[in-house]
Image (tube, grey):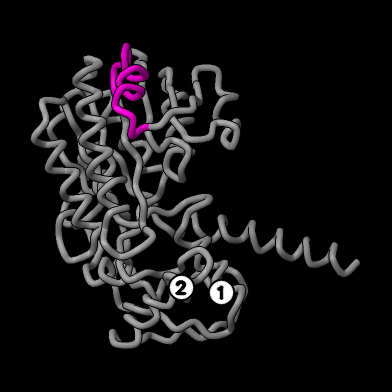
Amino acid sequence: MKPQTIVVLGGTGFVGSHLVPRLHADGHSITVLTRNREQHRELGVLPRVRVVNADVHDSAALTRHLTGADAAINLVGILNERGSDGRGFHAAHVELTQTLIAACEGAGVRRLLQMSALRAGEGTSFYLKTRGEAEALVTASRLAWTLFRPSVIFGRGDGLFFRFASLLGFTPVLPLARANARFTPVYVGDVCEAFARALAHPHTAGRTYELAGPRTITLAEMVRWTAQLTDRRRWVIPLPDTLGAIQARVGEWLPGKPISRDNFRSLQLDSVATDDGLAALGIVATPMEQIVPAMLGRDVRQRRLDHARHNY
Protein backbone atom coordinates (compact mmCIF):
# COMPACT_ATOMS: atom_id res chain seq x y z
CA MET A 1 0.00 0.00 0.00
CA LYS A 2 1.34 3.41 -0.98
CA PRO A 3 1.65 5.83 1.99
CA GLN A 4 -0.74 8.74 1.77
CA THR A 5 -0.96 12.26 3.11
CA ILE A 6 -4.07 12.54 5.27
CA VAL A 7 -5.80 15.42 7.06
CA VAL A 8 -7.87 14.41 10.09
CA LEU A 9 -10.62 16.53 11.64
CA GLY A 10 -11.56 15.45 15.15
CA GLY A 11 -8.30 13.56 15.49
CA THR A 12 -7.80 14.51 19.14
CA GLY A 13 -11.02 12.87 20.35
CA PHE A 14 -11.58 9.33 21.59
CA VAL A 15 -11.60 7.58 18.20
CA GLY A 16 -9.01 9.93 16.74
CA SER A 17 -6.50 9.25 19.52
CA HIS A 18 -6.62 5.58 18.52
CA LEU A 19 -6.93 6.09 14.75
CA VAL A 20 -3.98 8.44 14.23
CA PRO A 21 -1.39 5.95 15.60
CA ARG A 22 -3.04 3.16 13.58
CA LEU A 23 -2.72 5.14 10.34
CA HIS A 24 0.80 6.17 11.24
CA ALA A 25 1.71 2.49 11.57
CA ASP A 26 0.75 2.07 7.89
CA GLY A 27 3.30 4.70 6.90
CA HIS A 28 0.88 7.56 6.26
CA SER A 29 1.74 11.20 6.95
CA ILE A 30 -1.02 12.80 8.99
CA THR A 31 -2.04 16.36 9.83
CA VAL A 32 -4.41 16.64 12.78
CA LEU A 33 -6.37 19.89 12.92
CA THR A 34 -7.34 21.02 16.42
CA ARG A 35 -8.37 24.10 18.36
CA ASN A 36 -5.52 23.74 20.88
CA ARG A 37 -2.47 21.75 19.88
CA GLU A 38 -0.80 22.33 23.26
CA GLN A 39 -3.37 20.03 24.89
CA HIS A 40 -2.56 17.18 22.51
CA ARG A 41 1.20 17.12 22.28
CA GLU A 42 1.25 13.32 22.72
CA LEU A 43 0.15 12.81 19.11
CA GLY A 44 2.95 15.05 17.86
CA VAL A 45 5.66 12.68 19.11
CA LEU A 46 4.89 10.37 16.18
CA PRO A 47 7.41 11.32 13.45
CA ARG A 48 4.92 11.65 10.57
CA VAL A 49 2.15 13.36 12.55
CA ARG A 50 1.65 17.12 12.69
CA VAL A 51 -0.82 18.61 15.17
CA VAL A 52 -1.87 22.02 13.88
CA ASN A 53 -3.99 24.78 15.36
CA ALA A 54 -6.88 25.46 13.00
CA ASP A 55 -10.50 26.56 12.94
CA VAL A 56 -12.07 23.77 10.90
CA HIS A 57 -15.16 25.91 10.34
CA ASP A 58 -13.02 28.46 8.47
CA SER A 59 -13.35 27.48 4.81
CA ALA A 60 -10.20 29.27 3.64
CA ALA A 61 -8.05 27.82 6.44
CA LEU A 62 -9.44 24.34 5.85
CA THR A 63 -8.74 24.55 2.12
CA ARG A 64 -5.19 25.67 2.84
CA HIS A 65 -4.49 22.75 5.17
CA LEU A 66 -6.04 20.26 2.73
CA THR A 67 -3.97 21.38 -0.24
CA GLY A 68 -1.62 18.59 -1.24
CA ALA A 69 -3.41 15.90 0.78
CA ASP A 70 -4.61 12.60 -0.64
CA ALA A 71 -7.55 12.13 1.72
CA ALA A 72 -9.57 13.76 4.48
CA ILE A 73 -11.08 12.02 7.49
CA ASN A 74 -13.91 13.66 9.41
CA LEU A 75 -14.40 12.34 12.95
CA VAL A 76 -16.04 15.47 14.35
CA GLY A 77 -19.19 14.82 16.32
CA ILE A 78 -20.99 15.88 19.49
CA LEU A 79 -23.42 13.98 21.71
CA ASN A 80 -24.73 16.98 23.66
CA GLU A 81 -25.21 20.67 23.11
CA ARG A 82 -26.21 23.72 25.08
CA GLY A 83 -29.84 24.60 24.57
CA SER A 84 -32.45 22.46 22.89
CA ASP A 85 -32.86 23.86 19.38
CA GLY A 86 -30.36 21.60 17.60
CA ARG A 87 -28.08 24.43 16.50
CA GLY A 88 -24.98 22.86 18.04
CA PHE A 89 -25.62 19.54 16.31
CA HIS A 90 -26.31 21.28 13.02
CA ALA A 91 -23.07 23.28 13.23
CA ALA A 92 -20.90 20.28 14.19
CA HIS A 93 -22.39 17.75 11.80
CA VAL A 94 -24.07 19.51 8.88
CA GLU A 95 -22.38 22.88 8.49
CA LEU A 96 -18.90 21.48 9.07
CA THR A 97 -19.47 18.67 6.57
CA GLN A 98 -20.66 21.19 3.99
CA THR A 99 -17.56 23.32 4.61
CA LEU A 100 -15.29 20.28 4.43
CA ILE A 101 -16.73 19.07 1.12
CA ALA A 102 -16.25 22.50 -0.44
CA ALA A 103 -12.71 22.70 0.96
CA CYS A 104 -11.86 19.25 -0.40
CA GLU A 105 -13.12 20.23 -3.84
CA GLY A 106 -11.23 23.53 -3.68
CA ALA A 107 -8.00 21.82 -2.61
CA GLY A 108 -8.28 18.99 -5.11
CA VAL A 109 -8.78 16.27 -2.48
CA ARG A 110 -11.03 13.55 -3.87
CA ARG A 111 -11.13 11.02 -1.00
CA LEU A 112 -13.28 11.56 2.10
CA LEU A 113 -13.90 9.16 4.97
CA GLN A 114 -16.77 10.33 7.16
CA MET A 115 -17.82 9.14 10.61
CA SER A 116 -21.57 8.88 11.08
CA ALA A 117 -23.75 6.71 13.35
CA LEU A 118 -26.13 3.78 13.24
CA ARG A 119 -29.71 4.92 12.58
CA ALA A 120 -28.49 8.24 11.14
CA GLY A 121 -31.40 10.20 9.70
CA GLU A 122 -33.99 8.31 11.74
CA GLY A 123 -36.03 9.25 14.79
CA THR A 124 -36.53 12.62 16.43
CA SER A 125 -33.16 13.35 18.05
CA PHE A 126 -31.10 16.20 16.65
CA TYR A 127 -28.03 13.98 16.90
CA LEU A 128 -29.36 11.35 14.51
CA LYS A 129 -31.19 13.80 12.24
CA THR A 130 -28.08 15.92 11.67
CA ARG A 131 -25.93 12.83 11.15
CA GLY A 132 -28.37 11.88 8.40
CA GLU A 133 -28.27 15.36 6.87
CA ALA A 134 -24.46 15.21 6.83
CA GLU A 135 -24.60 11.82 5.11
CA ALA A 136 -26.87 13.26 2.43
CA LEU A 137 -24.35 16.02 1.73
CA VAL A 138 -21.51 13.52 1.45
CA THR A 139 -23.33 11.11 -0.87
CA ALA A 140 -24.46 13.98 -3.12
CA SER A 141 -20.90 15.29 -3.47
CA ARG A 142 -18.45 14.52 -6.26
CA LEU A 143 -15.96 13.08 -3.79
CA ALA A 144 -14.89 9.44 -3.49
CA TRP A 145 -16.56 9.03 -0.13
CA THR A 146 -16.89 6.23 2.40
CA LEU A 147 -19.33 6.43 5.33
CA PHE A 148 -18.99 4.58 8.62
CA ARG A 149 -22.00 3.98 10.87
CA PRO A 150 -20.84 2.57 14.21
CA SER A 151 -22.94 1.53 17.16
CA VAL A 152 -21.60 2.78 20.50
CA ILE A 153 -17.81 2.45 20.61
CA PHE A 154 -15.85 1.04 23.53
CA GLY A 155 -12.15 1.01 24.36
CA ARG A 156 -9.55 2.65 26.52
CA GLY A 157 -10.73 6.17 27.43
CA ASP A 158 -14.25 5.70 26.07
CA GLY A 159 -17.35 7.63 27.11
CA LEU A 160 -19.28 4.41 27.59
CA PHE A 161 -17.95 1.95 30.19
CA PHE A 162 -15.66 4.52 31.78
CA ARG A 163 -18.56 6.94 32.15
CA PHE A 164 -20.72 4.25 33.74
CA ALA A 165 -17.86 3.37 36.09
CA SER A 166 -17.58 7.00 37.12
CA LEU A 167 -21.32 7.37 37.71
CA LEU A 168 -21.43 4.16 39.73
CA GLY A 169 -18.72 5.52 41.99
CA PHE A 170 -21.02 8.27 43.29
CA THR A 171 -24.24 6.48 44.12
CA PRO A 172 -25.43 3.10 45.44
CA VAL A 173 -28.62 3.44 43.35
CA LEU A 174 -28.70 4.41 39.68
CA PRO A 175 -32.09 5.19 38.10
CA LEU A 176 -31.78 4.52 34.37
CA ALA A 177 -33.80 6.01 31.53
CA ARG A 178 -34.43 3.79 28.51
CA ALA A 179 -32.83 0.86 30.34
CA ASN A 180 -33.99 -1.61 27.68
CA ALA A 181 -32.43 0.26 24.76
CA ARG A 182 -30.27 -2.18 22.80
CA PHE A 183 -26.77 -1.75 21.39
CA THR A 184 -24.13 -3.76 19.54
CA PRO A 185 -21.00 -2.10 21.00
CA VAL A 186 -18.00 -2.10 18.69
CA TYR A 187 -14.34 -2.03 19.72
CA VAL A 188 -12.45 1.14 18.86
CA GLY A 189 -9.60 -0.93 17.46
CA ASP A 190 -11.98 -2.52 14.95
CA VAL A 191 -13.34 0.90 13.98
CA CYS A 192 -9.81 2.15 13.35
CA GLU A 193 -9.01 -0.96 11.33
CA ALA A 194 -12.08 -0.28 9.18
CA PHE A 195 -10.86 3.23 8.40
CA ALA A 196 -7.34 1.96 7.65
CA ARG A 197 -8.61 -0.71 5.25
CA ALA A 198 -10.94 1.70 3.50
CA LEU A 199 -7.98 3.98 2.82
CA ALA A 200 -6.02 1.06 1.43
CA HIS A 201 -8.76 -0.22 -0.88
CA PRO A 202 -10.28 2.19 -3.44
CA HIS A 203 -13.26 -0.14 -4.01
CA THR A 204 -14.67 1.03 -0.65
CA ALA A 205 -15.49 4.43 -2.22
CA GLY A 206 -19.22 5.03 -2.52
CA ARG A 207 -20.04 2.52 0.22
CA THR A 208 -21.51 2.76 3.72
CA TYR A 209 -20.34 0.37 6.43
CA GLU A 210 -22.28 -0.39 9.60
CA LEU A 211 -19.80 -1.18 12.37
CA ALA A 212 -20.96 -3.36 15.25
CA GLY A 213 -19.70 -5.91 17.72
CA PRO A 214 -20.83 -9.53 17.97
CA ARG A 215 -23.09 -9.09 21.01
CA THR A 216 -26.38 -7.25 21.47
CA ILE A 217 -26.75 -5.86 24.98
CA THR A 218 -29.21 -3.55 26.75
CA LEU A 219 -28.24 -0.36 28.52
CA ALA A 220 -29.17 -1.89 31.90
CA GLU A 221 -27.03 -4.96 31.20
CA MET A 222 -24.05 -2.76 30.34
CA VAL A 223 -24.38 -0.76 33.55
CA ARG A 224 -24.79 -3.87 35.73
CA TRP A 225 -21.81 -5.51 34.04
CA THR A 226 -19.73 -2.39 34.66
CA ALA A 227 -20.68 -2.49 38.36
CA GLN A 228 -19.67 -6.13 38.55
CA LEU A 229 -16.33 -5.56 36.82
CA THR A 230 -15.49 -2.62 39.08
CA ASP A 231 -16.35 -4.51 42.28
CA ARG A 232 -19.31 -2.31 43.13
CA ARG A 233 -22.66 -3.49 44.41
CA ARG A 234 -25.19 -1.17 42.85
CA TRP A 235 -28.93 -1.18 42.34
CA VAL A 236 -29.89 -0.22 38.78
CA ILE A 237 -33.53 0.88 38.53
CA PRO A 238 -35.13 1.02 35.06
CA LEU A 239 -37.36 4.10 34.77
CA PRO A 240 -40.63 4.36 32.86
CA ASP A 241 -40.42 6.86 29.99
CA THR A 242 -42.32 9.53 31.90
CA LEU A 243 -39.71 9.55 34.67
CA GLY A 244 -36.88 8.94 32.21
CA ALA A 245 -37.82 12.12 30.33
CA ILE A 246 -37.66 14.05 33.61
CA GLN A 247 -34.26 12.52 34.41
CA ALA A 248 -33.01 13.62 30.98
CA ARG A 249 -34.20 17.18 31.52
CA VAL A 250 -32.48 17.34 34.91
CA GLY A 251 -29.36 15.60 33.58
CA GLU A 252 -28.69 18.44 31.15
CA TRP A 253 -27.85 20.67 34.12
CA LEU A 254 -25.54 18.23 35.91
CA PRO A 255 -21.73 18.28 35.50
CA GLY A 256 -20.73 16.29 32.44
CA LYS A 257 -24.35 16.01 31.24
CA PRO A 258 -24.77 12.30 32.07
CA ILE A 259 -27.96 12.35 29.99
CA SER A 260 -29.82 14.99 28.00
CA ARG A 261 -33.20 15.29 26.33
CA ASP A 262 -31.58 14.60 22.98
CA ASN A 263 -29.81 11.51 24.37
CA PHE A 264 -33.22 10.31 25.58
CA ARG A 265 -34.67 10.77 22.10
CA SER A 266 -31.72 8.88 20.56
CA LEU A 267 -32.22 6.01 22.99
CA GLN A 268 -35.73 5.49 21.64
CA LEU A 269 -34.08 3.73 18.68
CA ASP A 270 -31.98 0.60 19.18
CA SER A 271 -28.39 0.98 17.95
CA VAL A 272 -28.23 -2.49 16.40
CA ALA A 273 -26.64 -3.16 13.02
CA THR A 274 -28.44 -4.88 10.16
CA ASP A 275 -25.32 -5.34 7.98
CA ASP A 276 -21.89 -6.61 9.04
CA GLY A 277 -19.61 -3.88 7.76
CA LEU A 278 -16.60 -5.24 9.63
CA ALA A 279 -16.91 -8.61 7.92
CA ALA A 280 -17.25 -6.88 4.55
CA LEU A 281 -13.84 -5.34 5.24
CA GLY A 282 -12.35 -8.65 6.36
CA ILE A 283 -12.37 -7.77 10.06
CA VAL A 284 -13.49 -10.17 12.78
CA ALA A 285 -15.38 -8.19 15.42
CA THR A 286 -13.73 -8.14 18.85
CA PRO A 287 -15.99 -9.31 21.71
CA MET A 288 -16.47 -6.95 24.64
CA GLU A 289 -15.53 -9.80 26.97
CA GLN A 290 -12.05 -9.80 25.44
CA ILE A 291 -11.39 -6.12 26.19
CA VAL A 292 -13.63 -4.60 28.87
CA PRO A 293 -12.79 -6.75 31.93
CA ALA A 294 -9.06 -6.10 31.62
CA MET A 295 -9.70 -2.46 30.69
CA LEU A 296 -11.79 -1.73 33.77
CA GLY A 297 -9.72 -4.08 35.93
CA ARG A 298 -6.71 -1.82 35.53
CA ASP A 299 -8.78 1.07 36.84
CA VAL A 300 -9.94 -1.01 39.81
CA ARG A 301 -6.35 -1.89 40.69
CA GLN A 302 -5.32 1.76 40.38
CA ARG A 303 -8.22 2.84 42.61
CA ARG A 304 -7.21 0.32 45.26
CA LEU A 305 -3.59 1.47 45.06
CA ASP A 306 -4.62 5.11 45.44
CA HIS A 307 -6.81 4.19 48.41
CA ALA A 308 -3.95 2.31 50.07
CA ARG A 309 -1.58 5.26 49.57
CA HIS A 310 -4.17 7.65 51.00
CA ASN A 311 -4.56 5.55 54.14
CA TYR A 312 -0.88 4.82 54.60
Residue with the mark numbered 1: 168
Q: Is residue 39 above or below residue 50?
A: below
| Residue depicted at 53% across the width and 85% down the height | 173
> Residue extending furthest left?
140
| Residue depicted at 40% across the width and 38% down the height | 10
Question: Which amino acid, mark 1?
Answer: Leu
Is residue 67 part of the magenta span, yes or no? yes
Q: Where is residue 106 in the image (x, y as percent from the top left)?
A: 21, 18
Q: Indicate which disc, 1 or 2, sits on the residue closer to the N terminus.
A: 1
Instruction: Tell whether label 2 touches label 1 (CB within 8 Å).
Output: yes
> Residue extending furthest right?
312
Name the secondary structure under disc 1: helix
10 Å neighbourhood of mark 1: few (<14), some, or many (≥20)? many
Is residue 279 part of the magenta span, yes or no? no
The residues colored magenta run 56-71
Location of residue 114 by image quarter: top left
Q: Position of residue 89 (x, y in %)?
A: 29, 52
Residue with the mark numbered 2: 223
Discs 1/2, front: 1
Name the secondary structure under disc 2: helix
10 Å neighbourhood of mark 2: few (<14), some, or many (≥20)? many
Q: Is residue 169 above or below residue 205?
A: below
**Left or right for 285, reference 306:** left
| Residue depicted at 43% across the width and 87% down the height | 237
**Left or right for 13, reference 170:** left
